[in-house]
Image (cartoon, grey):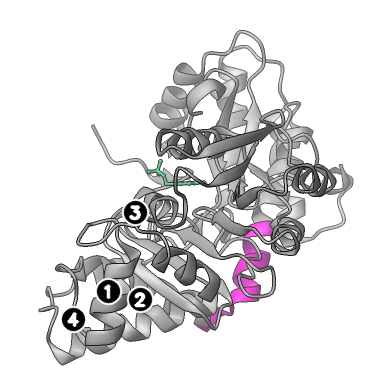
Amino acid sequence: MSTPAFTLTAGPVAASPRVLAALGAQIEYDYDPIFLERFRATQRKVAQIFRTEGDVVIMQGEAVLGLEAAALGVVTPETTVLNLVNGVYSKWFGERLARQGATVIEHAVPYDSAVDPADVEALLRAHPEVGVVAVCHCETPSGTLNPIAEIGPLAHAAGALVICDVVSSLGGTDVRVDEWGLDLCVAGPQKCLASAPGLSMVTVSERAWQAMRENPAAPRRAYASLLDWQSAWEEEGRFPYTPSVTDIVGLEAACDEVLQTGLEAVIARHEHAARAARAGIRAGGLRPWASSEEIAASCVTSIALPDGVEEAQLRTLCRDRYGVVISGAQGELVGKLVRIGHMGIASTSLYPLVGVAAVVGAMGDLGVPVDVGAASAATLAALTGAPAAASAR
Ligand SMILES: *Cc1c(COP(=O)(O)O)cnc(C)c1O
């Protein structure tokens, strides 16, 4: 089977030449001064992207490790968690917390919607026992964004810690850890930063460290221990276990690329790409899955599947006939939508046009009444900023 020409997925995604070159460099010894300095520098660069002056722990496993470490660190069987659910990841996280013994108050909204901060405020007032609020910033499987800028301060006002999954939003959407009072934020390199999967970047606020220190069940001498990283690496300058050196080199290159382009410009580029894709999808006769423009993600565009279209068949057509790999759905969304990713290089140049043309084209191949020409024109107009009527839809 040949390698597809375009990978426009929801992660892992294609990397830039600079990141690829970094990932292909000679493997470094973890205690060589070059790598020790690189690890510290990478922590600082990641902190800049998170917009935090606080601590960043880089854990050596896929982002789920960071999410588990955050949960195990501050949630005990005595903790009541308000879990905000609007998609597959937030639902999974609540189930994970419940298995850990926590009392989980689930506030769920439909998977094409976002959580309303007014509801969060009311729930926190009704449940003063809530010690942790868990929220997913970008529900990648649905392509929707939650208003964490408002939810963070509400949780803090109620005296609760915030655990926030920003895995797919970091680098593609504004994330302000300190300003918004997000205690534990988890990201990975394989989404908008566009390096290889295999690491978790976790921000930890002073309040979160304190909660972890006071939690006798917080992992110690364990792979998922944030405290081990703090005491070994920050206090003694040694690694609790061998870091994934090559992944760190890739992550540093990805951060350099973002910071040299400018974080704001990179975020704006992702938003611009997603807006153009949505304009094209609508002009072509299809419907974005997200219930409104305001909550639509910038890292991925989810497209509602018309009746009778089989998801796997559509994706196979995109890959085999057009050379474009897109993402399907996850969990209970399977069969309802497909997704075009805009992460990293996929948010540059004409990549969104490629994604829209492939999806709308393949829909047409399957007999759906679509207009590939209108879809392409609208995407192009939105990408180039040309004042075409289609871009205003
Ligand atoms: C990608 C992603 C993760 C990491 O999970 P995987 O399923 O292992 O890729 C976690 N949360 C969100 C919101 C993600 O997009």
Residue 21 in the image: x percent, y percent? 26, 71
- Mark 3: amino acid: Ala
For label 2, the residue is 252
Callout 1, which amino acid?
Val
Q: What element carries label 3?
A: loop
How far, Cα to Cα, is label 4 from label 3? 24 Å
* Picture quadrant of residue 16: bottom left
Q: Name the residue under label 1.
A: 249
Q: What element carries label 1?
A: helix
Q: First in sequence, mark 1 or 3: give its number.
A: 3
Image quarter hosting the C terminus:
top right
Among the two numbered marks 4 and 3 on one chain, the one whose residue lies closer to the N terminus = 3
Secondary structure under the numbered disc 4 in the rendered image: loop
Return the disc, 4 or 2, that comes first in the chain's sequence. Answer: 4
Image depth: mark 4 or mark 3 in front: 3
Query: Which structural element holds mark 2?
Result: helix
Position of 273 with respect to 68 (left or right) is right
